[in-house]
Image (cartoon, helix red, strand yellow):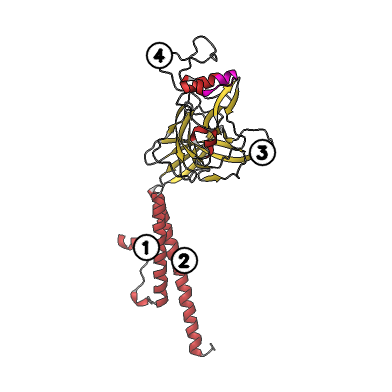
Amino acid sequence: MKFGDVLRRLDAYPRTLDDFSVRTVGGAAVTIISSSIIALLIFLEFVNYMQPTLNEELFVDTTRGHKLRINLDVTLHNLACNYISLDAMDSSGDTHLRVDHDVFKHRLDLQGEPLKETEPIKEIVAVSPANKNITCGSCYGAEHNSTHCCNTCEEVLDAYRIRKWNMQVDKIEQCKGKYKRSDEDAFKEGCRIQGHLEVNRMAGSFHFAPGKSFSIRQFHIHDFQFTNVKLSHTINHLSFGEKIEFAKTHPLDGLRVDVEESKSEMFNYYLKIVPTLYERNRDGQPIYTNQFSATRHRKDLTDRERGMPGIFFSYELSPLMVKYAEKRNSFGHFATNCCSIIGGVFTVAGICAVLLNNSWEAIQRKLEVGKLS
């Protein structure tokens, strides 16, 4: 026996002679439909192959040395920029003394449009600017030691607040031409506060409140004369790190809160922060960011409730970290799925074609013998 004859016996796909094959319209229809289904499924499989899969992992956060970046963009619709203070504190209530920040205020009208010919106001957060003057200005009796200098109007005001003294601004030399404002103008404008803070990775809080803020014996105080402060606001953006579209890094974006006329309220946002690591496949650079969930609470202060009108954000960090890692699918997996699609669809199509042909032949035989009414 020749070697070729031995190989022919191993043929699992014997060819049928053309004389014994019958081509039908039903078989052609099944072939066209099955081919279309195969092409569609292979295209979807190719799209899935080109897109990396996202693996999620949860583990204990052991990272060190990363700062917590707070990106904020908040609009207060009924309070002028000069009357808004932004303060950041840690979990013990002390203000952050080493805060790297870049926060600006933009003046708005009551309709939310920027005022013309105005420049953004740089916000001072928790730390005062360094004094570069050589001369030592008088504190008008409010200095706490012989070397205490008050070279600006704000320094004189702070010294008087610490002493709990009243002062006449028009008689202070440092305040002439610099402290001209009326509290009645506080509600004639709006303010948009944009920027970011970089603080240590620990539980803390930050808030927007009316009046100039200062501390006396570990008490945080805001100097403001009005009791009813309308704090309608919109959180345009709030995140703790870089923004990732598929993650919950910015769940409060676009939130607007309206307050009734002449009603003073205290708004509290309790944030639970989950550190997040995102490893992208295309560049391999890890992105350290944070996701968070938020719980809101508002308190009406018109019925002599304890509290201060303002917008308060308190955050806590989770000890667990979520890791998202992109992974490229292998070509072998793609090829296997394509073969499965082709074989499975053709097998099912063959069964359908046989059933269709047998049914049609049975109907024709009954018609021939007159048994079908």
- Whole-Å distance between the Cαs marked 3 and 2? 73 Å
Q: Residues within 10 Å of mark 2 (few under 14, many from 20)?
A: few
* Disc nearest the viewer among 3 and 2: 3
The reply to whether the magenta stretch includes residue 164 is yes
Q: What element carries label 2?
A: helix
Q: How far separated are the C-alphas under marks 1 and 2?
A: 23 Å
Residue 175 appears left or right of 160: left
Q: Which residue is drawn at 39% across and 37% down?
A: 284
> Could you tell me which secondary element the residue under label 3 belongs to?
loop
The nearer-to-camera label among 1 and 2 is 2
Pointer 4: what residue? 134
Q: Distance between the residues labelled 1 and 4?
A: 101 Å
Q: Name the residue tied to disc 2.
A: 348
First along the sequence among labels 4 and 2: 4
Q: Can residue 2 be seen in this view?
A: no
User: Residue 199 colored magenta?
Assistant: no
The Cα–Cα distance between marks 3 and 4, rounded to whole angstroms, is: 48 Å
Whether pointer 1 and pointer 2 mark residues with C-beta atoms closer than 8 Å, the reply is: no
Task: Give the amino acid type for the residue marked by disc 2 in the picture.
Answer: Val
Is mark 3 in CB contact (under 8 Å) with mark 4? no
Q: How crowded is mark 1: few (under 14 residues within 10 Å), some or many (20 or more)?
A: few
Q: Given this view, does label 1 or label 4 mark the residue nearer the observer?
A: 4
Question: Residue at image x 55%, y 27%?
Answer: 213
Mark 1 falls on what kind of element?
loop
Identify the residue position indicated by label 3 in the image. 302
* Residue 276 pos. (x, y %): 49, 36
Residue position marked by numbered label 1 in the rendering = 11
Residue drawn at point x = 42 percent, y = 43 percent: 327
* Magenta segment boundaries in residue numbering: 160-169
